[in-house]
Image: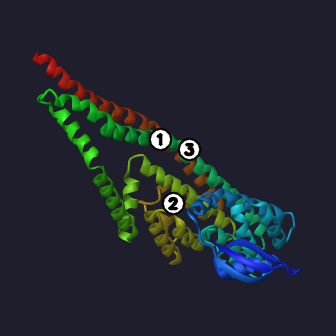
């Protein structure tokens, strides 16, 4: 979204100046006209560094979309027309959402469908969201679909917050270790080891290693930063290629504990989304196509694409999923087979999503529990090496007298 400064006239002929946020100049003009103004001029606003920081702070989050969906579903369920509901939400939503809601209202009042209006904001409303709203409009059950969407988005937010909260402690510990190590190598160790130069003593190997590492960080720290930057840039370029992204995603799944946790998190969101789409009347084939485009791992995305191709050829969904054990566990294809036999695919997918969510919680706890002793062992080895490297020369000097 871009910001535009406008100059317009109101119904009384007075000059009005202001600012709007929209995707293009035409969209900005439409927003200004929706306020009852006659547009004189519209210019793109040049952002200062402070305004960029402000925009980052006002960035639309998943929680904002969930709140908007909940409020909209409540109003439509109460019998309000969608234009009136959007008019109310335009003034009641968070500031970052107001421009989006205002543009949605302008598009709907211009005769576009709600799903088409949402489609102009793909960064805010994903493909799954738009497809569900479209199915609700076609089936005449938009209020029920929005209610399910709100529930699903809130569950996603709750689950994501739970996972992030559990991983905060290990991340803080690891970052703290790195910072302390750099401070020791750059500021503390050189002063301690500088004392030994006055004695011209023959230093032991651990001390020489420590002096070499510390000297490199002190004299050539910029080279380390450059090498790190180049490494990250090359990794980013490699990940931008289809083969590179797949290799990295495969490697992530092979990381002990963490890799399986990532798989469980993706499968939780995948099955929950598929359940919601099937329950809203979206065909399983279309649901597989949409989820393959929004899932965050190419291993699972490629498996979903192949599964949708298999289903399109007439194979059962369970069979299509069972062909990809590298992406989907056996229990998923088993449960899907049950859903196909009973005709309750959405209910079965909801249950399997709950199973994956519980397993993810257990793996998060296991990851946290595993990191703590590993961190303690690494800290112990590091401290032990420092003690040996610093104390051993002192012991050799005292023993020589």
- Residue 398 in the image: state x and y as whole percent: 16, 17
- The local secondary structure at tag 2 comes to helix
Q: Is residue 345 above or below residue 263?
A: below
Tell me the residue that label 1 is attached to.
172
Q: Image quadrant of residue 323?
A: bottom left
Question: Residue at 38% across / 71% down in the picture?
Answer: 241
Q: How is the image coloured?
A: rainbow
Q: Where the N terminus falls, by quadrant?
A: bottom right
Residue 107 visible, this angle: no
Q: Where the C terminus falls, by quadrant?
A: top left
**Labels 1 and 3: the sequence-earlier one:** 3
Res 333 label: 2
Q: Alpha-carbon distance for marks 2 and 1?
A: 38 Å
What is the crowding at mark 2: few (fewer than 14 residues within 10 Å), some, or many (at least 20)?
many
Q: Image quadrant of residue 274?
A: bottom right
**Labels 2 and 1: the sequence-earlier one:** 1
The number of callouts visible is 3
Foreground: disc 2 or disc 3: 3
Q: Image quadrant of residue 234?
A: bottom left
Q: Alpha-carbon distance for marks 2 and 3?
A: 31 Å
Q: Nearer the viewer, residue 83 or 399?
A: 399
Residue 60 visible, this angle: yes
- The local secondary structure at tag 3 comes to helix
What is the crowding at mark 1: few (fewer than 14 residues within 10 Å), some, or many (at least 20)?
few
Q: Alpha-carbon distance for marks 1 and 3?
A: 11 Å
- Residue 340 in the image: state x and y as whole percent: 60, 65
Res 165 label: 3
- Residue 105 in the image: state x and y as whole percent: 77, 74
Question: Residue at 47% across / 53% down in the picture?
Answer: 262
């Amino acid at each position: 979204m871009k910001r535009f400064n406008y100059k317009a006239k109101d119904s009384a002929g007075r000059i009005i100046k202001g600012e709007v946020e929209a995707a293009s100049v035409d969209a900005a003009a439409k927003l200004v006209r929706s306020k009852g103004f006659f547009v004189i001029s519209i210019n793109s606003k040049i952002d200062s560094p402070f305004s960029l920081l402000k925009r980052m702070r006002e960035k639309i989050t998943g929680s904002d979309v969930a709140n908007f969906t909940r409020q909209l579903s409540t109003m439509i369920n109460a019998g309000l027309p969608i234009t009136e509901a959007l008019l109310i939400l335009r003034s009641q939503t968070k500031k970052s959402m107001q421009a989006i809601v205002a543009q949605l209202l302008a598009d709907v009042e211009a005769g576009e469908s709600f799903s088409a209006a949402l489609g102009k904001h793909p960064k805010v409303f994903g493909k799954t969201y738009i497809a569900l709203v479209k199915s609700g409009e076609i089936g005449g059950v938009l209020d029920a679909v929005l209610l399910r969407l709100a529930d699903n988005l809130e569950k996603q937010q709750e689950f994501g917050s739970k996972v992030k909260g559990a991983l905060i402690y290990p991340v803080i510990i690891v970052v703290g270790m790195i910072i302390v190590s750099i401070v020791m190598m750059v500021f503390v160790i050189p002063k301690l080891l500088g004392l030994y130069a006055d004695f011209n003593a023959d230093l032991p190997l651990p001390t020489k290693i420590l002096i070499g590492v510390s000297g490199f960080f002190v004299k050539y720290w910029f080279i380390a930063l450059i090498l790190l930057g180049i490494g990250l840039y090359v990794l980013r370029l490699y990940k931008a290629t289809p083969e590179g992204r797949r290799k990295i995603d495969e490697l992530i799944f092979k990381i002990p504990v963490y890799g399986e946790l990532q798989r469980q998190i993706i499968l939780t969101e995948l099955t929950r989304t598929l359940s919601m789409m099937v329950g809203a009347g979206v065909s399983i084939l279309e649901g597989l196509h949409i989820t393959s485009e929004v899932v965050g791992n190419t291993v699972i995305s490629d498996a979903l694409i192949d599964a949708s191709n298999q289903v399109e050829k007439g194979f059962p969904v369970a069979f299509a999923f069972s062909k990809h054990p590298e992406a989907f566990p056996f229990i998923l294809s088993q449960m899907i087979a049950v859903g196909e036999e009973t005709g309750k695919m959405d209910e079965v997918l909801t249950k399997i999503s709950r199973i994956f969510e519980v397993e993810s919680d257990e793996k998060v706890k296991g990851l946290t529990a595993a990191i703590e002793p590993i961190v303690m062992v690494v800290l112990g080895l590091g401290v032990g090496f420092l003690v040996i490297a610093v104390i051993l020369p002192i012991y050799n000097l005292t023993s020589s007298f």
